[in-house]
Image (cartoon, rainbow, N blue to C red):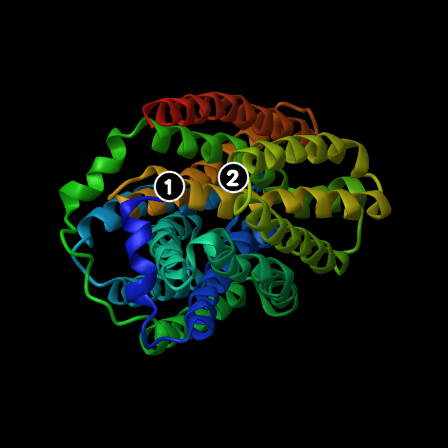
Amino acid sequence: MTQGSSTEPATASRGHAPGLVLLALALGGFAIGTTEFASMSLLPYFARSLGVDAPTAGHAISAYALGVVVGAPVIAVAAARLPRRLILVGLMVVFAVGNLLSAVSPNFQAMLLFRFLSGLPHGAYFGVAALVAASVAPPERRAQSVAMVMIGLTVATIIGVPMANAVGQWIGWRWGFVIVTVIAALTAVSVYLFAPRDAAHPGASPLRELGALGRGRVWLTLAIGAIGFGGMFCVYTYLASTMQEVTHASPAALPFVLAVFGAGMTVGTLACAWAADRAQIPAIGGVLLWSAGALALYPMATHSLWTLIPVVFLIGCGGGLGAVLQTRLMDVAGDAQTLAAALNHSAFNFANALGPWLGGLAIAAGYGWASTGYVGMALALGGFAIWLVAAVDARRTRLAVAAAE
């Protein structure tokens, strides 16, 4: 247990109902998950509306991801001395504005800018929310408490994304982003009312947060997410187009398939968090291998809904990697908790940029829509290779500590 994570539960939870705190934080995860994944599912619609092809429209996904990559460390460092509750409220206000502007984008260039703006609060929100969630839970349930925040994102893939996609089909893709704006505003109010009213952590400073960047185990953990998570995003980004062009499914089937993916993410998040509270390092390696296997099945499953649906569920289960890596960063970041936690989502959104980019290259090269499964499998195995290095390092550290005792 790190110093930052071991001292917070007793102080942050006084006077606050953990259930209400987690519910408010999860609502923000619901808003973020809805916009992140709904924009992928709405890609064919805003591509036509803004006059670009699907691979080019994928750059809007990458612009959002780039916003996360840039925003997470910058905001975490700049806001180091602010109370976490105020940080979360401010981030949700900016997030709401970014999505409202996305809804009224007059052209694709404006869409790119507004998606970048929308992405800026994402990583810092999840990072700070994870620390607040861990602070209201006993040490042995940290991963499961963090997972409850992530459940907001996974429930978004079950309810929010299909709803936004259905609305996008029925009355226009712009309304999908309007829905997110409303949810983000509700989150800002909920967090203001229910999150712990604690002062900034004593001694917090931008310089202390930057200390995370000098820790090798932080970088290894981030690299696992940056590469290993890319496979899931590679497939998900082009799932709607694949169902149209390869599966020849009715547009009405897409919201259901998206909900199946979300159900897989929910199951995976809960299962992986439970495993992480018992065997953290093996849980990370196991979910990466699971993802590689599920992604390898995807190209063979795309020709029929009957085979596609169960494989999409299996791929979604790999989303459980997020909560596990979040708690791993809490253990290796020392006093630089906020920056490390936020950087976790920079890593994931680097994956969100890398996966669609590589998948788009494979599609543009003529390998077909289903080739994203093979690209995704390679990325998951790449993450597993980095995990092997991290696992060896963790074992070496345990042995060194045991010898010193």
Residue 190: image quadrant is: bottom left
| Tag 2 secondary structure | helix
Q: Quadrant of residue 104?
A: bottom left
Marker disc for residue 280? 2
Q: Could you tell me if residue 364 is visible in this image?
A: no
Quarter in which the N terminus is drawn: top left
**Amino acid residing under circle 2:** Gln
What's the mark number on residue 395? none
Residue closer to the observer: 35 or 13: 13
The answer to whether residue 242 is visible is: yes
Tag 2 or tag 1, which sits nearer the N-term? 2
133 lies above or below 338: below
Amino acid, disc 1? Asp
The residue under the point 38% across, 59% down is: 129
Q: Quadrant of the C terminus?
A: top left
Residue drawn at x 52%, y 62% is 152
Q: Residue at x 78, y 46 (%)?
A: 310
Pinpoint residue 23: horizontal percent, then vertical percent: 47, 70
Identify whether 253 is placed above or below 186.
above
Q: x and y percent of residue 374 in the render?
A: 67, 27
Residue that numbered label 1 is attached to? 331
**Location of residue 221 by image quarter:** top left
Choose between 177 and 298: the one closer to the eye. Answer: 298
Question: Where 363 falls versus 236 (above or below)?
Answer: above
What element does badge 1 sit on?
helix
Measured along the vertical axis of the image, is residue 218 above or below residue 209?
Answer: above
The percent position of residue 201, horizontal first and vertical second, equals 20, 57
Look at the numbered discs 1 and 2 and tell me whether their residues touch, using CB distance below 8 Å.
yes
Residue 79, image x, y percentages: 20, 54
